[in-house]
Image (cartoon, rainbow, N blue to C red):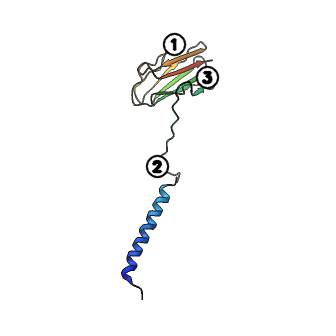
Amino acid sequence: MIDTRTLLPRRRLAGAVLAGALLAVTGCSDSGGGGGSSTTSAPATTGSASASASASGAGAATIVIKNFAFRPATLSVRPGTEVTVMNQDSTTHTVTATGAKAFDTGDIAAGKTATFTAPGKAGSYPYICSIHTFMKGTLTVA
């Protein structure tokens, strides 16, 4: 004869163990569909290391401001290219050429965009955020 007094607690324990194992397995997997989101951030550049990009054709180019950094740190464009600046940061920034003063977006509020036209003369144009002068980038016109 089966002792039903011990059978019910054993079933509950087995169910709890099975549920815990199932939760552990599914919690560690990447289903890849819906539900959650995944973000990947680019490593910050410091010192002499820099990221660079080129605008292809006579089209537009983009500088993104995020985490108090310009991305890419170096952008190559053709003379007269329209450059869009997207401020994805939490505060106001600028893109202001140093030296020649060839371009200046003025203040770009958080979440906003601005545009400027790249200089018509080939050369290297360093720029900063005039509010946060440690933020630096270079626009190369070729």
Of the numbered discs 1 and 3, the one sitting upstream in the chain is 3
Residue appearing at x 57%, y 28% in the figure: 51
Residue 36 got which mark? 2
Cβ–Cβ under 8 Å for marks 2 and 3: no
- Looking at the rendered structure, the secondary structure element under dot 2 is loop
Cα distance between the residues tagged 2 and 3: 38 Å
Query: Marks 1 and 3, how far apart in space?
Result: 19 Å
Q: CA distance from mark 1 to mark 2?
A: 44 Å
- First in sequence, mark 1 or 2: give its number: 2
Closer mark to the observer between disc 1 and disc 3: 1
Q: Residue furthest bottom?
A: 1
* Residue where numbered disc 1 is placed: 102
Q: Quadrant of the C terminus?
A: top right
Q: Secondary structure at mark 1?
A: loop
**Identity of the amino acid at label 2?**
Gly
- The picture quadrant where one finds residue 93 is top left
Q: Secondary structure at mark 3?
A: loop
Amino acid carrying label 3: it is: Ala
Q: Earlier in the sequence, mark 2 or mark 3?
A: 2
The residue that mark 3 highlights is 58
Query: Going 43% across and 28% down the picture, which residue do you hit?
Result: 112
